[in-house]
Image (cartoon, grey):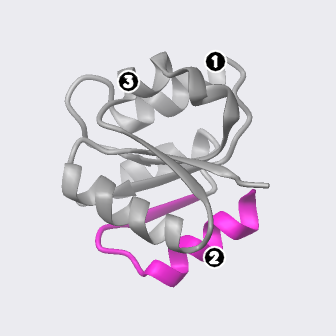
Amino acid sequence: MTVQIAIVDDDADVRSAIASLVRSAGYEVRTYASGEDFMAAPEIACTRCLIVDVNMPGMSGLDLQARLAEAGHPFPVVVITARPTIQSRTEALRRGAVAFFGKPFGDDELLACIERNI
């Protein structure tokens, strides 16, 4: 069985790099350029884990995390950011994120996190 991992990041290069990494571990991956795109995607129901950037135009990763919780989507959320702050980390974890990584992060660290949480 394939497990779908969703990646939401406004940076196309970051999306592509993370997608390649996650695919190399045998997971099915879907990528989205914004939280709005992900919320509108029919594949949301098949998502088993979400990797989301904090700082994006429009809906932030933390806003997306909150909207998903409100909508009752139970999958684990991994939050990533190039500009980690104590405030964003605290907020992400308070809202139920299973991990919070500053960019760049270790490939093995991200894959181990996914494996632990799906």
Q: Is residue 63 left or right of residue 74?
A: left
* Viewer-nearest residue: 64 or 43: 43
Residue drawn at x 20%, y 49% as measured from the top left: 11
Q: How many marks?
A: 3
Residue drawn at x 64%, y 64% as measured from the top left: 114
Which label's residue is closer to the chain start, 3 or 1? Answer: 3
From the image, which quarter does the C terminus lie in? Answer: bottom right
Q: SS for tag 3?
A: helix
Q: Are marks 3 and 2 in contact (CB under 8 Å)?
A: no
Q: Amino acid at mark 1?
A: Glu
Rendered location of residue 38, percent (x, y): 45, 28
Q: SS for tag 1?
A: helix
- Which stretch is magenta? 99-118
Q: Amino acid at mark 2?
A: Ala
Rendered location of residue 31, percent (x, y): 40, 43
Image quarter of residue 96? top right
Which residue carries the number 3 mark? 37
What's the CA distance linking mark 3 and mark 1? 17 Å
Q: Amino acid at mark 3?
A: Asp
Which label's residue is closer to the chain start, 2 or 1? Answer: 1
Which residue carries the number 1 mark? 70
